[in-house]
Amino acid sequence: MEDQNTKMQNNPKVSTSSTDVALTFWQKINYSCGGFANNVLLGLYFSFMIFFFTDVLLIPVGLVSLFSLVCRFWDAVNDPVIGVMADRTQSPKGRYRPWILYSFPLLIVCTCLLFFTLPSGLSGFQAAFTLAMYFFYVLFYTMHDVPYSAMPAALTTNYASRGSIGAFRLAFGNLGMILAVATFLPLVNVLGGGDVNAGYFRAVIVLMIITVPFFLIAYYGTKEVVLLDPNAKRVPIREYFKIFKGNKPFIAMCLAYAFWGLWGNVGGTSRIYFFNYVYGDQAAFSFAATCQTVGMTVGAFLCNLLLKKAKNKRTPGMIAWFTGGAVLIGMAFIRLSPATLPLWYFCTFIYGICGMCGLTSIFACTPDLTVYTQRRYGIAAASFIFAVVNFAFKLAGTVGTSAFTWVLGLMDYVPGAEQTPAVESVMRASCTWLIGLFLIAGAIFQYMYKIDESSHKMDLSELA
């Protein structure tokens, strides 16, 4: 009998008998190592990069806002291009795994250079150099993240394993985030020897060295079993965009990812400013960021348990985002002081659980969305679909982060100085009620996602 696992054409055939396999614990761990390494970089990116630009390199905040807008928009628009290229890749090692191997060295080098301060004689070129490194960083990050995130659709077609591996990936990713946010500023102080600029650069180098073995495990420890027929006819790029038409679950996921992008980017960027200028203690920032990330790690594993009971993968995340949004709105009424700081930490831990539970849900939904789309539109486009939802995430994050820095500049933010009440109110809102509303909006769009286990199995059976 002809092996249907290798007959994926314009209307691809998937053999559930050969690909519907439960992944082992160690297979999930191996894949998740890539998430650990990936999130070390994200921890630096979300929590420290903009602050480094404005308060260490002393690049004007208006120029930083323009940096963020240009580079993050570029980051968003290159996602679908990389997604199509990854889906079309034909290699003995699979479609997506080769991208991990060849992109991560470029990404590591570029991350180090992004936090590099030029010698004093070249300080006039600092803004241009930083912009160039930012531009290449987001390209290399996309080359790694989009194929890596699409890989679960190629590792198995098993409904439960696809949900579980997403939870493992995000939980391990949060361990990488914890490593970054908890150790970075102490490393800066220890390695800098009083020189903050040198301390940032050396601390980044240390963290990048730690990520190398995890990137390699993610490559060598995984195997793609949902294969592409090497003789299959390539689908024209314009055909990919047909999957938008009438694809309500796809649109719902894009909007949910967009509000997650607003929550993560605005909240992550503003928090160091809030603790530095409103509360006046950077050490408290590191602990608060760690509390959130520990909560996010718990949320990923908790959601993994809840997904086993849920008929629709969106349900645990939808409830969690409503809850997390309410907690954040309530935090706006807490006047931060040494007496209320423990309560703030606790609330941060709780909304971290809720935020990651929601992300785990929508991440688990995405591979099933590829099967749904494949059956209705005849296109195997796992990487393209993730690229589009990631585009929504990044575009929303671009707008949110740029708006935050632009508003700071509009209100005469001055690095290292005492801020006006208006500037402090922007910092406070961006850490509490505003991002709480983003989570609630994301929960509403999760509700629109209707693919459950029974409909997913029907899609698989029709493809086979």
Image: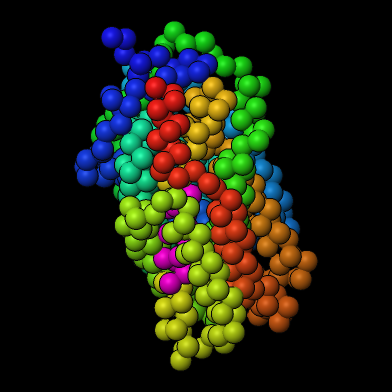
Asked if residue 431 lies left or right of residue 313, the reply is: right
Location of the N terminus (image quadrant): top left
192 in relation to 136, above or below: below
Q: Position of residue 24 (x, y in %)?
A: 22, 40
Q: Nearer the viewer, residue 364 or 133?
A: 364
Would residue 204 be visible to someone looking at this image? no
Q: Nearer the viewer, residue 298 or 405?
A: 298
Asked if residue 155 lies left or right of residue 275, the reply is: left
Q: Nearer the viewer, residue 156 or 394?
A: 156
Q: Residue furthest bottom?
A: 339
Quadrant of res 272: bottom right
374 in relation to 422, above or below: above
> Which range of residues does the magenta coloring cover?
350-363
Residue at figure coordinates x 47%, y 11% from the top left: 232
Identify the image's colour scheme: rainbow, by chain, secondary structure or one colour: rainbow
Q: Is residue 356 magenta?
A: yes
Q: Main secondary structure of the magenta part?
A: helix
Q: Position of residue 419 (x, y in %)?
A: 68, 78
Q: Residue furthest right?
A: 410
Would residue 298 be visible to someone looking at this image? yes
Q: Nearer the viewer, residue 191 or 431?
A: 431
Location of the C terminus (image quadrant): top left
Q: Position of residue 132 (x, y in %)?
A: 61, 40
Q: Position of residue 413 (x, y in %)?
A: 71, 70
Residue at figure coordinates x 61%, y 30% from the top left: 243
354 in relation to 242, above or below: below
Q: Is residue 407 magenta?
A: no
Residue at figure coordinates x 53%, y 46% from the top left: 450
Residue at figure coordinates x 51%, y 59% from the top left: 318
Q: How many marks?
A: 0
